[in-house]
Amino acid sequence: MTGGEAPGSAALGPAPAAVLPHGRTAMFVLLGALTSVGPLAIDLYLPALPRLAADLGVSASAAQLSLTAFMVGLGAGQVVVGPLSDAHGRRRPMLVGFAAFCAVSALCAAAPSVEVLVVLRLLQGLTAATGVALTKAVVRDLYGGIEAARFFSMLMLVTGLVPLLAPLLGAELLRITPWPGLFGVLAAAGGLLWLTALLALPETHPPALRSGAAPRAVLRPLVRVLRHRAFLVPTLTAALASGAMFGYVSNASFVLQDVHALSPQGFSLLFGVNSAGMIASGQLAGRLAGRVPMRRLLAAGLALSGAAGALLLVAALAGLGLPVVTAALFLLTSGSGMVYPMALTIAMSSQPASRAGSASSVFGLAQWSVGGIVGPAVGAFGTGTLTPLAVAVAALSLAGCLSAAVFLRGKD
């Protein structure tokens, strides 16, 4: 153990001074709504990527850069907002972030070129980072151990339902509006989320637990998190598994629509089925937490992802067709549904609640940065074949399994 942690810090529960005026169900609904901003801004316009590329006269890879820019901004923004929330509380940064998200989303709708859109999407990701990072910090403020695992698994309902519903909504909106209209919808959603946070979000990080406002004091929790192996290894494992998922998310619309001739509606339906698998596996992991060690649940999710990578690679090399590809992608998303909440709980529980914002920011940076790199890297090798996506998913899934194997060796 490094970073000067006291033994048993992983078992620390919520901050004793944390205020919880809402019931557990009400808090889940509130945080679920606030954490939806990231997935919504990614998945709503996935069906529009081919049309966006055609309208702006750019390649598929260039269009994917708008998705990559958002992911990079989402990761980088968390490194800023997480430590700031450890110093100033969770509520104020959340409100500022959602207000900025609303404004930038409106600007995206008026982007005249892909270059401008990429810059605006980067800014949009930076602003959306507040909702993604600080909801995890609020959970760590309020819950610890098995309760945190169950709560993070419940939030998988949101991170699963949004990919299930958002592409379907996006595809239907494309019937009545060009792709800029989707950003208008995101602007309206940002305004609604800001109002939700203003009216219902309590401050869960009391002044007694906050770091000082001086720059050195703000950075100190971040440095301690970065030196803590028990945090870094599950974070790396989750980042590799997330990279495989983001490779699928950012390239599936091109591969399935262009290679397998699915319509936007057909793609959205298939995407939704895979999201349902992620929801189901996440809820199963949450129910088993406490009866089955979290590390074993993490290993099970990684095994599913590894099998998905191998099957997808075989399908690409042997030309096995859409049914096998669909099965592999379903295994991939189902594995992710177990990996994410377990890895997140193990990582976050290794840190005291006073560093929850910093821990959440590093976890998010790793997750979204790897995803942002994988998407265009796969697209650069061409979207007219499944092979680049299959190779990326197989390699990242295997790397995630190897990372976890080192971490899990000799542990329950």
Image: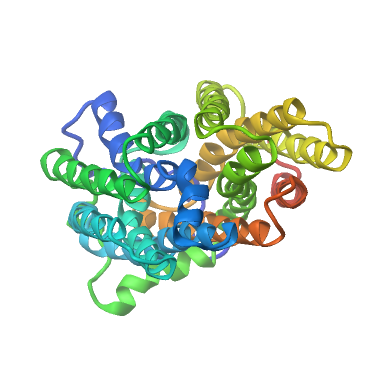
Q: In terms of depth relative to the viewer, which is nearer, 256 or 162?
A: 256
Which residue is pictured at 21% across the width and 44% down the height? 188
When the figure is inspected, residue 79 is found, relative to residue 215, above or below; the finding is: above
Residue at point 74% right, 52% down? 388
Whole-percent x, y for residue 270 in the image: 57, 28
Going by the image, does 112 lie left or right of 196?
A: right
Question: Is any atom of residue 248 visible in this view?
Answer: yes
Q: Establish if 28 lies above or below 115.
A: above
Residue 313 occupies quadrant: top right
- Of residues 238 and 101, the one nearer the viewer is 101
Say which of 102 and 368 sits in front: 102
Q: Position of residue 262 (x, y in %)?
A: 60, 32
| Quarter containing the N terminus | bottom right
Q: Quadrant of residue 288?
A: top right
Residue 337 x %, y %: 56, 33
Name the quarter where the C terminus is drawn: top right
Q: Which residue: 64% across, 42% down?
A: 258
Q: Residue at x 57, y 61 (%)?
A: 59
In the image, residue 257 above or below residue 275: below
Of all residues shown, which one is farthest toward the left?
A: 199
Image-based side of 203 in relation to 315, left or right: left
| For residue 402, side relative to residue 110 (left or right) | right
